[in-house]
Amino acid sequence: MELNHLRSFVTIARFGHLTRAAEALHLSQPALSGHVKVLEEELGVTLFDRTPSGMALTPAGEQLVAEAESILAAVAHLAQSAQALRGQPTGHLSLGTVLEPGVLRVGDLLVLALERFPQIEIELHQVMSSDALARVKSGVLDASFYFGDAPDAEFTAIPLRELAYSVAIPGAWATELTGASWESVAERPWIVAPEPSTHARLVRKLFGGELPPKVILADNEMVINNLVESGVGVSLVRDESGSASVDEGRIAIWSGSKVITRLWLVHSADRSSDPLLCALGEVLADTWTDAPPAIKVEAKGRSGALVA
């Protein structure tokens, strides 16, 4: 039984979809299907049922996925123990990034990491914020930047800064909508990132938990900003990314609402003693000297406030 086959099993179970699991593992769908087939033959049980919406665990799969996760966690712990015995942290660390590098201070972090821990190879992977937690949880990423609500209890979360989003309208609509009512703004077409993105969740907050009645999907921040500038519709735009467009009159800000979210660095809570992640945390702390202290989230209240 190969660890890669167990990792494929766990990742498909996490995502519930073969295509997204293949993307997360950087494998082709036929290769991923092959891993599952071999594992099912070795175990003598069927692990998944194919459904119109994706891949669903069978009763046998439900019982075995926890054991597969435990095996992968034990192997990771063995690697951590070996690294601790070697002293200087050595190895490969996969780090997920969201937004532009300047916002994350990635350049400063990498320079410091290379100076302080030359035996650690850091590989960056650009991900959607909505996928960051799932990829960290499945082990595809060792850690990731993430923005949105506080993550669940299985993550250690390092809060870095707040991010402010404003309702942006095309510059051509500024005279009509800048001081208009919310109803007038809400009825226009809205440009929203696909579910389950953080951007879509932020827009839902404005609309009381629902999406706007007229939605145009766009899959990244740059495209969203450009579509607003072009007069396609309204959207939530991060203040920093839209500032130049505001200054040049290509977009205008509706003053009636602003949404605040938070940028984090997250990793699995059960890997807090991992030498690689300890090294990353040390470098991150020196890169973000103005950030709040790290927290392990134990629970989340209904209001979204953290309960440590």
Image (cartoon, rainbow, N blue to C red):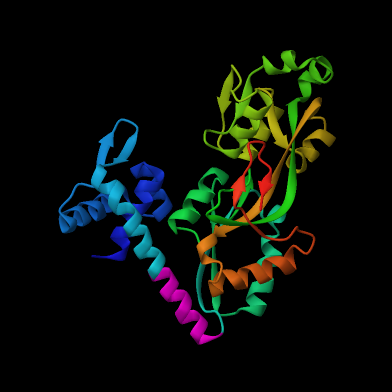
Residue drawn at point x = 57 percent, y = 33 percent: 193
Vertical side of 251 occupied by 77: above or below = below
Vertical side of 88 occupied by 225: above or below = above
* Residue 13 visible (yes or no): yes
Nearest the camera: 95 or 292?
292
Residue placed furthest toward the bottom = 86
- Give the main secondary structure, helix, strand or loop, of the magenta stretch: helix
Vertical side of 27 occupied by 260: above or below = above
Q: Quadrant of residue 175?
A: top right
Residues drawn in magenta: 75-87
On the rendered structure, is 9 left or right of 82? left
Q: Where is residue 42 shown, x and y percent of the image?
A: 17, 59
Residue drawn at point x = 66 percent, y = 40 percent: 304
Nearest the camera: 14 or 28?
14
Residue drawn at point x = 26 percent, y = 37 percent: 50
In which quadrant of the rendered image does the N terminus lie? bottom left
Residue 223 shown in magenta: no
Vertical side of 182 occupied by 115: above or below = below
